[in-house]
Amino acid sequence: MREAGFTKVEVRGKSGDGGIDGVGVLRVNLVSFQVYFQCKRWKGSVGSKEIRDFWGALQGRAEKGLFITTGHFTSQASDEATRDGAIAIDLIDGDRLCELLKENRLGVATEMIERVQIHPDWFERI
């Protein structure tokens, strides 16, 4: 969160946290937003129920929500996250999370490797 420009990041995520794992402040130009986030380690898909539960935890607390998972989101979850009249919830799935970790070099390193394979049969025909 800090690498993405958040300040005042506070990780809460304990039992009885009411569905909120943390909060941070994001400044965009002249305006600041308090963003609450939830992180879930999932192998499968996160559905609309989990988004609704998080949305309920945000009521009266935040202007914005961020839901991060190691899994992926169903199309119903994506629809629920942008439902009219509700606090907008941005979704980061496992693929996007990996990209963000790579971009910010957080716990991972990447390297490009060129592999050359020789086809001896091609050379034998010369």
Image (cartoon, helix red, strand yellow):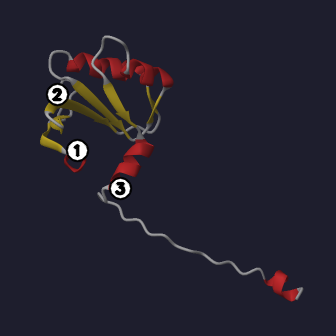
Observer-nearest of 28 and 109? 28
Q: Pick the quarter of the image with the N terminus.
A: top left
Q: CA distance from mark 1 to mark 3?
A: 13 Å
Amino acid type shown at disc 2: Asp
Q: Nearer the viewer, mark 3 or mark 2?
A: 3
Q: Is residue 64 left or right of residue 98?
A: left
Residue 17 - label: 2
From mark 3 to mark 2, how far is it between C-alphas? 30 Å
The residue at the point 30 percent across, 22 percent down is 88
Task: Say which amino acid is labelled 1.
Answer: Met
Is 40 displayed left or right of 13 in the figure?
right
- Please name the amino acid that badge 3 sits on: Glu
Residue 28 appears at what percent x and percent y? Answer: 20, 36
Would you identify the image quadrant in which residue 47 lies?
A: top left
User: How many numbered marks are there?
Assistant: 3
Q: Residue furthest left?
A: 8
Q: Is residue 35 left or right of residue 41?
A: left
Which mark identifies residue 1? 1
